[in-house]
Amino acid sequence: MSEHCIFCDILNKKAPADIVYEDDLVIVFKDIRPQAPVHLLVVPHKHIRSINELADEDRNLVAHMIFVGKEQARQNNINKSGYNLLFNVESGGGQVIFHLHLHLIGGYVR
Ligand code: 5GP
Ligand code: ZN
């Protein structure tokens, strides 16, 4: 990979982050500019640019990301109140970090 990637740096522990979970496939850390009381990013170890670049072999990885998001929602006690699981895709979709990530956003008082 030629372009510098901040999420790869976080994965490789070359940049700091508030990491809340990690396994063989993904890491989860707090968003640096939270949009809600709970705002976590579920990030695969594998550097994939965006949803557009997913290959057939990534199906289990994406499913795992969603299940990790679900479990983090439960652990953060927002599963009952509700939350968003969100992929921004490419610039027009609001993506600014081009390493695949799933936003878990919740904990609003409504
Ligand atoms: P995107 O718009 O690409 O879907 O979301 C990227 C997210 O990453 C944004 O919500 C932004 O606040 C977050 N972010 C960007 N740089 C960093 C960083 O260095 N550390 C952490 N923890 N979050 C970051
Ligand atoms: Zn990366």
Image (tube, rainbow, N blue to C red):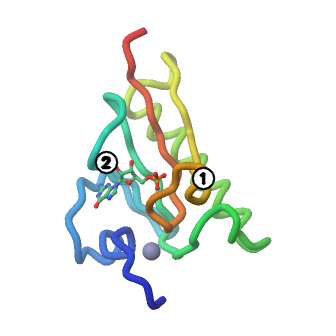
Q: Is mark 2 within 8 Å of ligand 1?
A: yes
Residue 73 picture location, percent across and down:
46, 34
What residue occupies the far top of the structure in this picture? Answer: 110
Foreground residue, 35 or 91? 91
Q: In the displayed structure, does residue 27 sit left or right of residue 13?
A: right
Please determine whether, in this image, residue 13 is positioned above or below residue 65. Answer: below
Q: Quadrant of ligand 1?
A: bottom left
Instruction: Report which residue position mark 1 lands on.
Output: 92
Looking at numbered disc 2 in the image, what kind of residue is underneath it? Lys
Q: Is mark 1 within 8 Å of ligand 1?
A: no
Instruction: Report which residue position mark 2 lands on.
Output: 30
- Of labels 1 and 2, earlier in sequence is 2
Foreground residue, 37 or 73? 37
Mark whose residue sits in front, 1 or 2: 1
Q: In terms of image quadrants, where is residue 72?
A: top left
What residue occupies the far front of the structure in this picture? Answer: 92
Residue sitting at x 43%, y 9%: 110
What residue occupies the far bottom of the structure in this picture? Answer: 2
